[in-house]
Image (cartoon, rainbow, N blue to C red):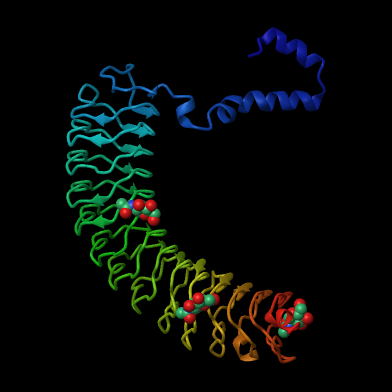
Amino acid sequence: MLYPQTRNNQLTNMSRGEIIILFLSLLFESTLTQCENEKDCPKENQEVFSSVTDIPHTLRPGVTEVFFLDGKIKTIPNAAFATNPQLEKVDFMNTGTLSIEAGAFEGLVSLKDVEISNTALTSIPVGVFKDLSNLEKIILKFNKLRSLEKGLFDGLKKVKEIQLHGNEIELIQDGTFDDLENLVLLHLAKNNLSAASANWFSNLNKLQMLRLYENQLTAVPEGILQNLPNLKEIGLHGNKIAELPPNLFPHKDRLLKITLDNNLLTGLPQDFFVGFPQLKTLTLQKNQLTSLPPVLFGEMPKLTELSLSQNNLSTLPKGIFKPLKKVKKLDLSKNHFVTLSAEYFEGPEKLTELNLLNNKIKSLDADVFEKLQSLVTLKLAFNKTQKALPQ
Ligand SMILES: *[C@@H]1O[C@H](CO)[C@@H](O)[C@H](O)[C@H]1NC(C)=O
Ligand SMILES: *[C@@H]1O[C@H](CO)[C@@H](O)[C@H](O)[C@H]1NC(C)=O
Ligand SMILES: CC(=O)N[C@H]1CO[C@H](CO)[C@@H](O)[C@@H]1O
């Protein structure tokens, strides 16, 4: 740290540019360099315990947020915070925790935020969040949780966000989420779910983001999104879904993002993507789509890119992309096309880039891309003709 005297002396010998840089770095030093992480420079109301083995009974006066980092707190025992009912935030990160007793957070009536992440915890007892009626955010990511039992989240009417990704959850009991009437985000990605129940989310009227990606789901039951009129994002990529029910999306008005890539889809229901006025992101690549229904898409004024890459398409219905008036980039690479018809490309008037790399295209009619008035980039190389030639 420079003392004012030294700093003045230095300033006189510096150019204007150097002075500006010095001031900027002094200005940002504390906010950027040292405090990338809130735990690196605790505020007045925060206390950080690194590498401790026990939870202290006495905290600095005025502390409302405690962070435990690293170390070995094997068990979070009953009444661990009984002497500190003022706490609003309690975080355990990478603390080697293996168990939590059901009364661990007893008495924390002001608690808004709780996090236990990066531990080997395999279960969370029902009752651990009991009476924490002011809780707004629960983060339990990257542990080794196996199941979620009904009752765990009971009474938590103010909770807006639950993060449970990166666990090994195989089982979620029906009714587990039923009291969470204000939940906005539910993150269940990167778990071991192989089946989903149609009732899991039936009380989550306020839910906007539902992340189920990178699980082992083989199907999605009809009705699972039935009572979610506010849904903006549904993440289903990286599962093993082979088929989707025709009425999966009863509420389409607010949906911005649907991810279905990296599944085992061989087909899609007729009209499946009709009626999504806000949809900006739709991913379908890396499936096994062998054909598409005659009508699949409706007008999606916000959709500018569509990838059907790495599927098994060898033909397309006439005018399939016609409603996609705003799509600029269309990726059909790594499919099984042997030839193409001009009929496929009727309609997407804004299309500037079409990717057909890595198909099996042998011949094309001269007029095949005639309807694509805005086309600028056409990628066609690496077709099978080249490989077939030597034989
Ligand atoms: C969950 O899945 C991962 C990866 O697929 C696997 O390594 C792990 O053993 C599974 N856990 C359980 C409890 O089955
Ligand atoms: C899709 O094509 C791959 C090879 O590219 C093949 O292994 C797979 O069985 C095909 N799937 C279907 C449903 O045709
Ligand atoms: C139809 C088509 O695009 N054929 C191309 C396949 O690849 C060879 C070699 O790159 C081209 O010469 C063909 O025009």
Residue 98, percent from left and from top: 28, 35
Residue at position x 71%, y 9% from top? 6
Residue at position x 17%, y 41% from top? 127
- Which picture quadrant has residue 379? bottom right
Along the line of sight, which residue is nearer the eye, 325 or 271? Answer: 271
**Left-right relation of 43 to 89:** right
Along the line of sight, which residue is nearer the eye, 24 or 294? Answer: 294
Residue at position x 43%, y 82% from top? 271
Looking at the rendered image, the quarter that the C terminus falls into is bottom right
Residue 235, percent from left and from top: 42, 61
- In the depicted structure, whether residue 343 falls above or below residue 302: below
Q: Can residue 190 be seen? A: no
**Left-right relation of 315 to 272:** right
Looking at the rendered image, the quarter that the N terminus falls into is top right
Q: Can residue 360 be seen? A: yes
- In the depicted structure, whether residue 181 falls above or below residue 141: below
- Residue ranking furthest to the front: 391
